[in-house]
Image (tube, helix red, strand yellow):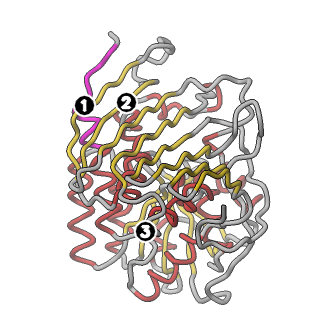
Amino acid sequence: MAAGSAAPQNLFAADNKADGMNYAPVGKPNAVVKPGEFVFAAAHLDHGHINGMSNGLTEAGATLKWVFDPDEKKTKAFREKYPQARVARSLDEILSDPEVHLVASAAVTSERGPLGCRIMEAGKDYFSDKAPFTTLEQLAQSKAVVARTGRKHMVYFGERLHNESAMYATDLVQQGVIGRVVQVTSLAPHRLSAATRPAWFFQRAKYGGILCDIGSHQFEQFLAYTGATDATVTQALIGNFANPNYPELEDYGEASLVGNTGASNYVRVDWYTPDSLATWGDGRTFILGTKGFIELRKYIDIARDTTGNHVYLANEKGVAHIPVEGKVGYRFFGEFILDCLNRTEKAMTQAHAFKSAELALLAQNAAKRLTA
């Protein structure tokens, strides 16, 4: 059964599929601007997602001019992947460059909100790794700066925006293929790889908690698939069952929401992916509609196929397994670049990005702990 509207693009395989922290999908270049028309910088490289963010932007035609991090080892490693980036002496050097439209950052989670405010106050748009905030106060501050400056604070919700099956499902839902969406279930296991994680990753005040961190992806997907613009947290739970050596780590979380469309949401996140799995997590999303349902096996079809991006669809017309790896691409990045240039909101609205972050914070704050 044919479904969806995206045209095949024959993408290359994703990099670092076994390592979630450094997972950086690579796609076929699909430029929406000419060289030099949209210039960006990468600053504060504390999480490997900066590579995926940079890949998406450069493949869409953005020109990467600068990189900055206080740690020279990080800038050196970054320039091995992106030799075109010049090393800035400071963030101020980037912010004072009139050619720079956007600053992308994967700073320590607790520092992302304040950093973004500084960047936007300097007249640049801001592209943050998820989660963009660790407190509601940071969210409020960023909202105020966006309102005052007119700049954008966009967020890298990569589990939808940088996943072909998830973006394909976005099209299916919008086309009404399964009718009105009434429930979304997201299962998002991740591999911990504790030995390769920085110290801040295990400090609750710095990473924000598991529902704030991994959960932010899932709440964004719920809003996207249901069309909800707000939701209420009905239950949230967290725990540390397997990592007593890291007492501030939460290695398990779950939450339930009800959106203002009437649709409900269940999210489960964890750090338990076994080393035997060929990918960092068997991420799955289940979307239930009034006329059918969709299941996404995003990164692997366990014990059958090590490739990802499997879409399973059942509706009134029939059932289908639709493998979309290499056939959809990553349109968000090109749309976002054009949004920055044209001051539009096609890729994602600011309200949607902020509401996704808010729901993650509210769920985290409401969570009851299951373990001592």
Residue position for label 2: 254
Q: Residue at x 61, y 30 (%)?
A: 191
Spatial separation of the CA atoms under disc 2 and disc 3: 30 Å
Q: How many marks?
A: 3
- Tell me whether the residue at label 2 lies in contact with that at label 3, contact meaning CB atoms closer than 8 angstroms: no
Q: Is residue 142 left or right of residue 316?
A: left
Residue position for label 1: 235
- Tell me whether the residue at label 1 lies in contact with that at label 2, contact meaning CB atoms closer than 8 angstroms: yes
Amino acid beneath label 1: Gln
Secondary structure at numbered mark 1: strand
Is the residue marked by circle 2 packed among few (<14), some (14-19), or many (20+) residues within 10 Å? many
Within the magenta stretch, is there residue 6?
Answer: no
Q: Measured from the top left, where is residue 50 in percent x and y?
A: 58, 56
Within the magenta stretch, is there residue 363?
Answer: yes
The span shown in magenta is 361-370
Residue position for label 3: 126
Pointer 1 or 3: first along the chain: 3
Instruction: Please state which of the two labelled residues, at mark 2 or mark 3, is closer to the viewer.
Output: 2
* Residue farthest along the front direction in this orientation: 317
Q: Residue at x 32, y 34 (%)?
A: 255
Spatial separation of the CA atoms under disc 1 and disc 2: 8 Å
